[in-house]
Image (spheres, rainbow, N blue to C red):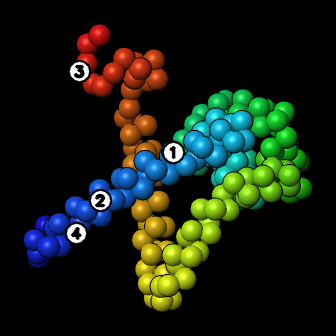
């Protein structure tokens, strides 16, 4: 990178490595929460997406999660049966169905994420408003970039059946 010093190069390399580690540990954390709720990792991601959005159609969830609408419909069926979500008619268009999180599920999920929220709140309490804004913007932008990169990989990626055979070029 032009204009970047050696120490900046080192810091950027450490940042990239640190973010990759954070992503791995986040997946591990989500997996532990999913286990506590008896959900798959994808099901929990759907539930957490609904916690953030409050409501969504199956098509919106499919786009957000990078899944087909058929896969999302089956997932919603499982989550309805397990009491995590409900299907409701859209008041603006009764032909559309809106998926919402059930209040009891919201409480269960929030409880499992409470420890993580407390750690972040405690760490953030020592920062200035400017530092918090910088971190907020950085995290938001990195989340959007990560979503775009995941979408790109899925679009160019190999089908699940082929993917299970190992890395590209691997021969069993």
Dot 1, crowdedness within 10 Å: few (<14), some or many (≥20)? few
Numbered disc 4: secondary structure: helix
Quarter assignment of residue 110: bottom right
Q: Is residue 143 visible?
A: yes
Left of 82 or right of it: where is 160? left
Label 2 vs 1, first from the N-terminus: 2
Dot 2, crowdedness within 10 Å: few (<14), some or many (≥20)? few
User: In the rendering, at what x and y percent does residue 123 appear?
Assistant: 51, 75
**Mark whose residue sits in front, 3 or 4:** 4
**Mark whose residue sits in front, 2 or 1:** 1
Residue matched to label 3? 169
Are circles 4 and 2 on residues that touch, CB within 8 Å?
no
Are circles 2 and 1 on residues that touch, CB within 8 Å?
no
Question: Disc 1 to disc 4, how far (Cα)?
Answer: 25 Å
Numbered disc 3: secondary structure: loop
User: In the rendering, at what x and y percent does residue 98 appear?
Assistant: 80, 48
Label 4 vs 2, first from the N-terminus: 4
Query: Residue 16: which disc?
Result: 2
Screen quadrant of the C terminus: top left
**Which residue is at the front of the view, 153 or 167?**
167
Label 1 vs 4, first from the N-terminus: 4
Residue at 73 percent across and 53 percent down: it is 109
Question: Disc 2 to disc 1, how far (Cα)?
Answer: 19 Å
Residue matched to label 1? 28
Farthest top residue? 172
Numbered disc 1: secondary structure: helix
Screen quadrant of the N terminus: bottom left
User: In the rendering, at what x and y percent does residue 161 appear?
Assistant: 45, 17
Residue matched to label 4? 11
């Amino acid at each position: 990178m032009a204009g970047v010093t050696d120490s900046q190069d080192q810091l950027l390399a450490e940042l990239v490595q640190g973010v990759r580690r954070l992503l791995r540990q986040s997946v591990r954390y989500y997996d532990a929460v999913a286990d506590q709720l008896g959900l798959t990792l994808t099901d929990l991601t759907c539930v957490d997406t609904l916690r953030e959005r409050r409501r969504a159609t199956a098509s919106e969830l499919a786009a957000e999660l990078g899944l087909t609408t058929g896969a999302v419909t089956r997932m919603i069926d499982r989550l309805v049966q397990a009491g995590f979500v409900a299907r409701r008619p859209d008041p603006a268009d009764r032909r559309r169905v809106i998926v919402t999180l059930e209040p009891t599920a919201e409480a269960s999920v929030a409880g499992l994420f409470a420890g993580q929220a407390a750690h972040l709140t405690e760490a953030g309490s020592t920062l200035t408003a400017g530092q918090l804004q910088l971190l907020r913007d950085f995290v938001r932008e990195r989340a959007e970039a990560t979503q775009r990169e995941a979408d790109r990989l899925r679009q160019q990626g190999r089908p699940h059946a082929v993917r299970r055979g190992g890395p590209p070029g691997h021969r069993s």
